[in-house]
Image (tube, rainbow, N blue to C red):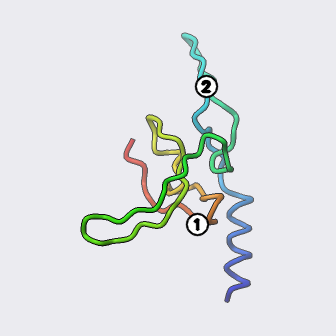
Amino acid sequence: MKRMLVVTLLFLLTTLPVFGRGGSHSHSSKTSKTSTAACCSKSASDVHVHGYTKKDGTVVQPYTRTHENSTQRDNFSTKGNVNPYTGKVGTKEPTH
């Protein structure tokens, strides 16, 4: 069972579509170019969040997230993306 999960994860990692990830954008009147960096590889712009305890007592472990920007499509938890730090496949639909 564990082996099947590893094989499936490796398959997904090699076949998922590649999305642009933030970076600089240049715009002209007819076309636009985006960064060619693949989504969801480790990046120097990723943000480390320290662990904390919520008011209700829930403990949140430290984690790493993508740098905040105007889209959710490059977030680790969005469908089509894989968190390079945990290997977890994204499950959330982007709302913007």
Q: Give the image location of residue 52, x and y in percent.
A: 40, 62
Q: Is residue 96 above or below residue 16?
A: above
Q: Quadrant of residue 2?
A: bottom right
SS under mark 1: loop
- What count of labels does the image hold? 2
Quarter occupied by the N terminus: bottom right
Q: Residue at x 49, y 53 (%)?
A: 49
Q: Give the image location of residue 60, x and y in percent.
A: 42, 66
Q: Is residue 55 above or below residue 75?
A: below
Left or right of residue 25: residue 68: left
Q: Residue at x 50, y 57 (%)?
A: 77
* Location of mark 2 (residue): 24
Looking at the image, which residue sits at the far bottom? Answer: 1
Q: Amino acid at mark 1?
A: Lys
Task: Name the residue nearer the viewer: 61 or 30.
Answer: 61
Q: Residue at x 25, y 65 (%)?
A: 55
Q: Give the image location of residue 94, x and y in percent.
A: 42, 49
SS under mark 2: loop
The circle drawn on residue 88 is 1
